[in-house]
Image (spheres, rainbow, N blue to C red):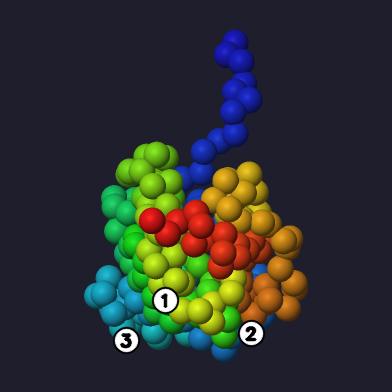
Amino acid sequence: MEEASLEPKKQTEEEKFKKEIGDFFDAYKSGEERFNAFLSAGVGIFIKKGILEKEKTTQELRECSEILNRDEFINKTLIVLEPILEIKKKNPRLIEKIQAEAFLKEGNLIKLNDLLSYGVDENSIHIHLAPSKELLREVGKENYLKLIIEGLKKLAKIVEKDETIKKITAISDVVTNNPKRMAEFGFVVTGYISEQQKNQYFESERRDISEAEISREELLKRYLN
């Protein structure tokens, strides 16, 4: 008799996609909220890119938004978004690039490189990490970390020219999961963001979101060269 494997079963792309749709259902309670969130949460850019047909997809997503049963919502939404899933299976990096493009547009962010972008809020700069799991696989850990350094060096040059910027913050589940790595980059993790912040900026995100910061002086000392 073969021994049962203790390794957790690896999720297929379809199972992951279904989970994302289920999380989406849980995050938005009314049909109108769901429909508006569909278009603002990234589906809109797949329509713009021609991956999804505009009129057909819009009508079908509006119908899906009104479904009250969670399993039915997941299964029918999966059918509507199947073209995205098929590309995700064949070329996951392409999907990641499209998602990153939507991320920049929705957040009104300025791109530093394929990994980092930033926004400005009074005397602070907020840096953001683009969706990058496939990029990590593509370039490897060493080059991935080099991209972060490269982005921070570009940011340091920008901060040097703007004396109103006093601190730089990063808010992400990446901060939560990598406090030692953040410290290596010169950031201090200040803790979880408030529920109000999470509801405002990460409404459908179920993972813990933390904030880290680095002072202007520390950023320039480390990365301006």
Q: Residue at x 64, y 84 (%)?
A: 30
Circles 3 and 1: CB atoms closer than 8 Å: no
Q: Which quarter of the picture shows residue 173? A: bottom right
- Given residues 126 and 1, the one toward you in this image is 126
Mark 1, residues whose alpha carbon is within 10 Å: few (<14), some, or many (≥20)?
few
The residue singled out by tag 3 in the image is 55
Tell me: residue 1, above or below residue 75. Answer: above
The residue singled out by tag 1 in the image is 161
Whether residue 171 appears in this view of the structure is: no
Q: Give the secondary structure at mark 2.
A: loop
Q: Residue at x 51, y 86 (%)?
A: 36
Q: CA distance from mark 3 to mark 1?
A: 46 Å
The residue singled out by tag 2 in the image is 30
Measured as percent of width and height from the top left, residue 111 is found at: 37, 70
Hey, what amino acid is under mark 3? Glu
Hey, what amino acid is under mark 1? Lys
Left or right: 161 with respect to 215? left
N-terminal of the pair, mark 3 or mark 1, is 3
Q: Which quarter of the picture shows residue 79? A: bottom left
Q: Residue at x 60, y 10 (%)?
A: 1
Hey, what amino acid is under mark 2? Ser
Mark 2, residues whose alpha carbon is within 10 Å: few (<14), some, or many (≥20)?
few
